[in-house]
Image (tube, rainbow, N blue to C red):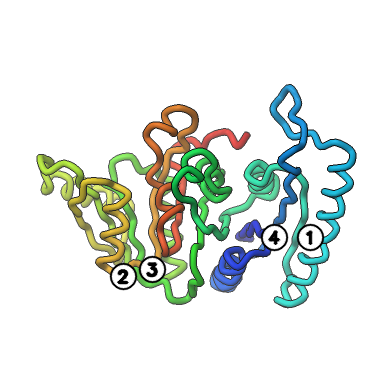
Amino acid sequence: MYKILVPTDFSKYAGYATDFALALATMEKAHVHFLHVVEYPSGAMVDAMGMMVPVPADLDFVNVLKENSLKKMKALIRELELDATYEVQIGNPSILIQEAIRDKSIDLVVMGTKGATGFKEIFIGSNAEKVVRKSLCPVITIHEETEATEIENIVFASDLREESDELMQKLKHLQSTFGAHLHIVKISTDDRGDDEEVLGQMREVVSKYKLKNYSLNIYKHKYEDEGILAFGKSINADLIALGTHGRTGLPHFLAGSVAENLVNHAKCPIWTCHLGKTPDYK
């Protein structure tokens, strides 16, 4: 059975993700699993491995938070009248989400995000951004209230040069689920490029994967992420999809990530799936 993981902090953004996931679960005939993570206090000690080790007083406080969160989770399940599973864990949200993806063979993560801007985006980043960077399965991030049944136009940002077989099959599944038109777009940041050559390469890949109900586009813009958003706005995109490399460390800090920038700044849902080998979740 298709399995959807919904990480929740009981915020309104998590509520948007929950509503979207439940509608999608009906369309997919999928099982939904909820996960809430209680984080250790910021003042907790750090061990030699860099992991949070709370002092006894903090641990007592965290356990109280866990019990309260369990009550909230049970109330949520009752209110929604769901046949869903759930768990409440203590620790690092992004790491525990990755563990749940692996241990429960999750097919898709749907999670809310309020994004991040300025210094927070650079130095901290959102949990959604961290999950997108390392997820073992596709992730849909939700920023605003969105009706899953009204997804009609999907932007797939790519020049179809690096896409893996796995990514393309998952993209086809995404398009089929929504019955949407696929707007494949290459953001051209170099006016010297040969558009016809790029379109020819895109047509070859489209033929290889037998894509249907699609259009091929080249959109000129100075920056790739802003170009994707501008193109999406021009065609009234309901969802943006793209493959992503899970870059970490200094190269990630210097170059940033198009996918993570979109997660932080896009208003419509963003679907991401790793190209090639997925990074270690730890």
- Badge 2 is on which residue? 236
Name the residue nearer the viewer: 40 or 192. 40
**Mark 1 is on which residue type?**
Ser
Residue 183, percent from left and from top: 29, 61
- Badge 3 is on which residue? 238
Q: How many marks?
A: 4
- Badge 1 is on which residue? 69
Crowding at mark 2 (Cα within 10 Å: few <14, some 14-19, many 20+): some
Between the C-alphas of marks 3 and 1, the distance is: 33 Å
- Within the image, what quadrant is residue 229 found in? bottom left
Q: Name the front one of labels 1 and 2.
A: 1
Between the C-alphas of marks 4 and 1, the distance is: 12 Å
User: Which residue lies at the image location 48% right of the left edge and 45% below the top edge?
Assistant: 121
Q: Which quadrant is the N terminus positioned in?
A: bottom right
Q: Is residue 208 left or right of residue 55?
A: left
Q: Which mark is residue 34?
A: 4
Residue 112, percent from left and from top: 56, 60
The tag earlier along the polypeptide, 3 or 1, is: 1
Name the residue nearer the viewer: 236 or 171. 236
User: Which residue lies at the image location 74% right of the left edge and 71% below the top edge?
Assistant: 76
Crowding at mark 3 (Cα within 10 Å: few <14, some 14-19, many 20+): many
The tag earlier along the polypeptide, 4 or 1, is: 4
Residue 270, percent from left and from top: 44, 57
**Mark 3 is on which residue type?**
Asp
Q: Is residue 52 left or right of residue 157?
A: right
